[in-house]
Amino acid sequence: MGGAVSAGEDNDDLIDNLKEAQYIRTERVEQAFRAIDRGDYYLEGYRDNAYKDLAWKHGNIHLSAPCIYSEVMEALKLQPGLSFLNLGSGTGYLSTMVGLILGHLHRQRIPRFPAPGLSAELWTLRILQAGQQAGYLIMQCLLHASSSVCTRCPSLSPAQGPFGINHGIELHSDVVEYAKEKLDSFIKNSDSFDKFEFCEPAFVVGNCLQIASDSHQYDRVYCGAGVQKDHEHYMKILLKVGGILVMPIEDQLTQIMRTGQNTWESKNILAVSFAPLVQPSKNDSGKPDSVGLPPCAVRNLQDLARIYIRRTLRNFINDEMQAKGISQRAPPKRKRKRVKQRINTYVFVGNQLIPQPLDSEEDEKMEEDEEGEERERGETQKLEEPPQNLLREKIMRLPLPESLKAYLTYFREK
């Protein structure tokens, strides 16, 4: 499935094509797609195909076409703080992009100092304020966990807590290990990790048709395999009232909104072709084993403090960039290289008519235009491009022990 848009030269070029074709329509989804390089989820030797609008499969490892993922992300209508369940989570590519949106919460902000260029003492004061805010939030989380909303596993919503939940269930254990490796690599090596408040996905091995009956419900659910009609209701009850389920059913990618305890609204999004869900195997008693979803552990104070310290610094960086007139939005669409047309003339050599390429005046003008565009783009980048990882730079300048700096950077080496 795929092939709806032209192949890109790299990840940004692919996203440009998806935007042009209206598969990506919102800034939030665009930012998530640009932040995660699709090529990083391919095996070595297969990356050349990463930026084509095609599905890819190698053994149990599978990625849907980019046009499918973009339609799914748009149809889910993701918001910070929601809970998300990915049925057939695969490589973790989609779950990681979703995590950039679920955790990116600007609603609760740390008080700001009005002037840029703070001293080390004021930086330290901001850190203490971040810690105080974290202490308040952990009490909020503990109160929510002890409430009767969900005795087994609390699900924080935007009205009840500042953090999302990001769970995935995958049939194949080797694919789950692959997803965890890719997730670890993203956290340790990608500069995008420091530009977002990331809701880290948690993966379990199991058949998504065997989820334990006492499992909690989610705000958003996606199924990455073809759902048979007799499993439709099973999928629907995984959803909270007001939630959205996106799944392929009867060769249509379908968006289902739960409007009440027993009412749903459905809308077909796109004609698709997915492999069907694998039917669960049964144990010796003749019944399939149930699968438990990842736990929803309340964050500890240390983790909350790190999150809010990083948020404080990130907010301060954004203020500095705005004061300097540097945009923090997604980069502008890049101009494509135009293919030069050659005029073939024919000349006689002896008794033979031989074609000979000849540059036209139009070709020369196109070459000049391209050179001008490249110069202009290069000058703009020199003037406006900030260093790649400003958050890390701020953390490393803080008057703190090296061990604490390492913790604040998630022990990243760059």
Image (cartoon, rainbow, N blue to C red):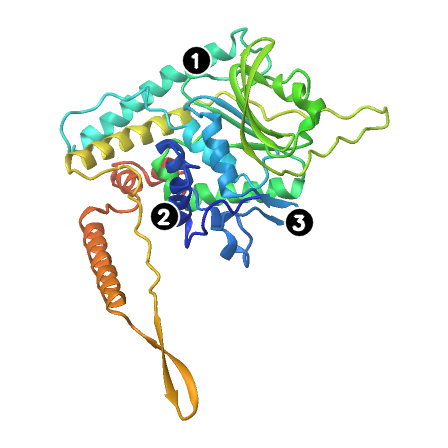
Question: Of label 1 and label 3, which has the lower sequence position?
Answer: 3
Q: Check the picture and name the quadrant holding the N terminus.
A: top right
Where disc 2 sits, the SS reads: loop
Q: Residue at x 21, y 23 (%)?
A: 112
Q: Residue at x 39, y 90 (%)?
A: 349
Find the residue positioned furthest to the bottom: 350
Q: Amino acid at mark 3?
A: Gly
Tag 1, which secondary structure? loop
Residue that carries the numbered disc 1 in the rendered image: 160
Between 146 and 382, the one nearer to me in the picture: 382
Mark 2: amino acid: Lys
Earlier in the chain: of badge 2 and badge 3, it is 3
Q: In the rendered image, which residue does mark 2 sit on?
A: 414
Task: Name the residue carrying label 3.
Answer: 59
- Say whether residue 216 is left or right of residue 406: right
* Residue 366: image location, x then y, percent: 26, 62
Distance (Cα) linking label 2 and label 3: 33 Å
Determine whether label 2 and label 3 are within 8 Å by CB: no
Q: Position of residue 103 (x, y in %)?
A: 41, 27
Q: Is residue 8 above or below residue 126?
A: below
Q: Are marks 1 and 3 in contact (CB under 8 Å)?
A: no
Residue type at mark 1 is Gln
Nearer the camera: disc 1 or disc 3? 3
Left or right: 126 as drawn, with respect to 404: left
Q: Position of residue 330 (x, y in %)?
A: 31, 39
Query: Counting other residues with Cα less than 10 Å from the Cα at mark 1, is it few (<14), some (14-19), or many (20 or more)?
Result: few
Q: Quadrant of residue 213?
A: top right
Q: CA distance from mark 2 to mark 1?
A: 35 Å
